Image (cartoon, rainbow, N blue to C red):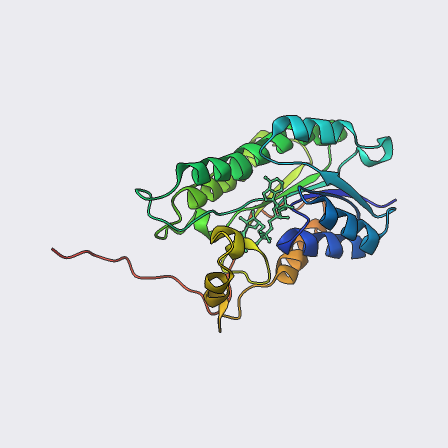
Amino acid sequence: MSKIALVTGVSAGFGKAIAEKLAACDYKIIGAARRWDRLQKMREQLGEERFLPLQMDMTKTEEIDRALADLPENWQNIDLLVNNAGLALGLDKAYEADFKDWLTMIQTNIIGLTYLTRQILPQMVKRNRGLIINLGSTAGTVPYPGANVYGASKAFVKQFSLNLRADLFGTQVRVTNIEPGLCEGTEFSNVRFKGDDERAEQLYQGAHAIRPEDIAETVAWISSQPEHLNINRIEMMPVSQSFGPQPVHRF
Ligand SMILES: NC(=O)c1ccc[n+]([C@@H]2O[C@H](COP(=O)([O-])OP(=O)(O)OC[C@H]3O[C@@H](n4cnc5c(N)ncnc54)[C@H](OP(=O)(O)O)[C@@H]3O)[C@@H](O)[C@H]2O)c1
């Protein structure tokens, strides 16, 4: 019998590639996002036996509740939860950033992710099986100017993933945090720069960055590991990306 994966942020970027890859690995996919037209296209592409669209806004816990309550009976036992929906907004210094952007990142990357996880975890523990894969970021470890709340939200996701492992001790439920660096081929920077597509495009010029397919391969690899093995964290970067010096401001 096919396993069931719930993948958030399935309408673009990583989530779309992850859904396609998992479908090819014989998973049935519950694909969540806000944009209904994109979800419908994915259902047409993957077929309604394989893909169930779930429209929900991760910033609204009541929408998450309603969407989960509406799941047909044969789609309710979730084997794999991929907490991928997330975003960065702006690259402004903390003293210039728009606080509304901070709230949106906190509501999506932290509150939405933790709420959905809290709703799905009991059934995994009850069945004593399941895997949660979170999408963190190198920004959760490596500080950079303008990352302020985005980086902090991904640091939260990293520590939340590790703490889940601590709570799940004694069960067969597994948790992994994937922490990518620069990735192209997604809408991430178009969203971050609020539709300034030229600025987004410039970021990737000549970088040969990570592709959504690379992340999808990683998700498929993690989920294909034997059940006695937990991959705690995977940090990945394009070869073209590295670490900077620690700057010293001289007076
Ligand atoms: N691209 C990178 O460089 C990079 C690097 C490291 C980590 N990440 C992380 O990887 C994840 C995916 O990023 P991506 O590059 O694939 O971004 P993307 O192309 O912008 O896709 C983001 C997805 O999240 C969904 N989403 C955003 N806000 C939502 C909300 N309030 N409710 C429901 N769904 C929401 C979007 O769907 P709708 O708009 O249809 O709702 C979309 O499907 C994010 O968590 C991101 O932080 C990205």
Q: Residue at x 65, y 25 (%)?
A: 62
Nearer-the-camera pick, 29 or 127: 29
Nearer-the-camera pick, 66 or 229: 66
Q: Is residue 122 visible?
A: no
Q: Position of residue 59 (x, y in %)?
A: 58, 33
Q: Residue at x 67, y 32 (%)?
A: 171
Q: Residue at x 54, y 60 (%)?
A: 183
Nearer-the-camera pick, 46 or 167: 46
In the picture as drawn, the residue positioned furthest to the front comes out as 195
| 19 shown above or below 60 | below
Q: In the shown orientation, is residue 245 left or right of residue 99?
A: left
Q: Position of residue 237 (x, y in %)?
A: 50, 61
| 206 shown above or below 172 | below
Q: In the shown orientation, is residue 94 left or right of residue 22?
A: left
Q: Position of residue 87 (x, y in %)?
A: 53, 46
The quadrant in which the C terminus is found is bottom left
Q: Quadrant of residue 115?
A: top right
In the picture as drawn, the residue positioned furthest to the left comes out as 251
Q: In the shown orientation, is residue 153 left or right of residue 161?
A: left
In the picture as drawn, the residue positioned furthest to the bottom comes out as 206
Q: Is residue 41 visible?
A: yes
Q: Quadrant of residue 63?
A: top right
Q: Position of residue 64 (x, y in %)?
A: 67, 31
The quadrant in which the N terminus is found is top right
Total labels: the figure holds: 0
